[in-house]
Amino acid sequence: MDFVCQRSDLARGIATVERAVGAHDDREILEGILIRADGDRLQLVATNLELGIECYVPAVIRRPGAAVLNGRVLGQIVRKLGGDDVVYTTEENKTARIESGRSRFTVHTMDADDFPSLPQVDAGPMWRISQGQLKRMIRHTAFAAAADDSRPFLTGVLFEVEEGELRLVATDSSRLSYYESRLKEPAAQGGTGIVPLPCLTELARILDSDDETDVEFTVTESQAVFCLPDARVISRVIEGRFPDYRRVMVVDQPCKFTLSRQELYDAIERVSLVARRNTPIVRVKVADGLLALSAHEAEVGQAFEEIPVAQQGQDHETAYQARYLLEVLRAMDADEIEVGLGEGLRQGSIRAVGDEAFIYIVMPVRVG
């Protein structure tokens, strides 16, 4: 295998796939990136058997072939090269020469036949949505998935496709984040599956932020596949039954108010500074058009801040974990938000003003 390509193109391709490289795996081959040269491009593939990513890089192929190189070593070499072009030449004894500018490296390779193949895509419907919108949906929901794997079905994001609509839902049982959006075309056949968080983290990293380019995807009983113009992400789906999220989205809230998202975020961040030793709890009190935020720590001190709000309904007082509020406010991109407070220990909600597509449900905490 011999080829020449732009260093920037190769570096981009490696950056796309290297997060799927297996770390400290008993199988050395999984620590590598498969490079296959054919036609007028390179195929780069990495997998840890749970997640697989492949992408394509333009190149001048002098001799077709394939080899596996250690992903960490290859990435470090290519990122540090000084030249514009990379010349790859196969040497004897399973080694390869990589040249660029004044630099020359000789690195060991592994047999491409030993590299595991990515799963074949199940025959099924493919749906289409803009890359920017899917990236937005992932950002608004993935943070709410559970970190504790004692209940694996909560450690991913539920994908639901029905007719012309895509719904993403994530919950850790103390909060729930929901986002719905229209597909580019109505789906002749729907589908559902729980996509693992590592897959969505990497997918969001390589998705474009604009709404001009599309991503095709499908979610089946066994796998999720996302196809971009120059890349493909394949992941297993999580087994288990996702909770009936619709039950908690019907909320009776006697108190609602609107305010600036950034202003609320900054205020919560400030008042929770005094409660860093334990799980920061922020008390929320709404009365006479003022939102009062407070926190205290016996051995540290206390904090208090007031913000004018547009209040609807009765006065109310409750408390939430500061992290559960900060994470959703950080993920949102709306300027103005509406906050709803439930009676007693019933759930509260946060949504963008004038946008019914997204809603965040959060449970309050009992304080003495």
Image (cartoon, rainbow, N blue to C red):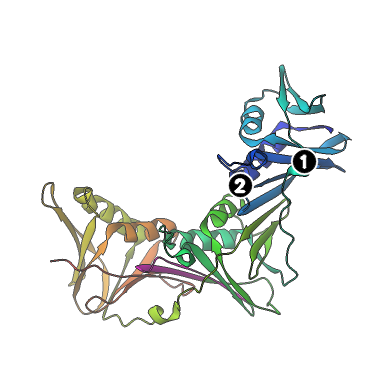
Give the spatial CA distance, label 1 vs label 2.
17 Å
In the rendering, at what x and y percent does residue 253 appear? 29, 80
Q: In the drawing, does residue 126 fall left or right of residue 296?
A: right
Q: Is 176 in the magenta?
A: yes
- What number is the disc on residue 20? 2
Residue in front for this viewpoint, 140 or 259: 140
Kind of residue at badge 2? Ala
In the rendering, at what x and y percent does residue 222 appear? 64, 67
Residue 120's image quarter?
bottom right
Residue at (38, 57) in percent of width and height: 327
Above or below, 250 against 48 in this view is: below
Q: Which of pointers 1 and 2 indicates the residue nearer the eye?
A: 1
In the rendering, at what x and y percent does residue 129 appear? 65, 66
Residue at (71, 58) in percent of width and height: 119
Kind of residue at badge 1? Ala
Which range of residues does the magenta coloring cover?
A: 165-179
Q: Quadrant of the C terminus?
A: bottom left
Above or below, 327 against 122 in this view is: above
- What number is the disc on residue 112? 1
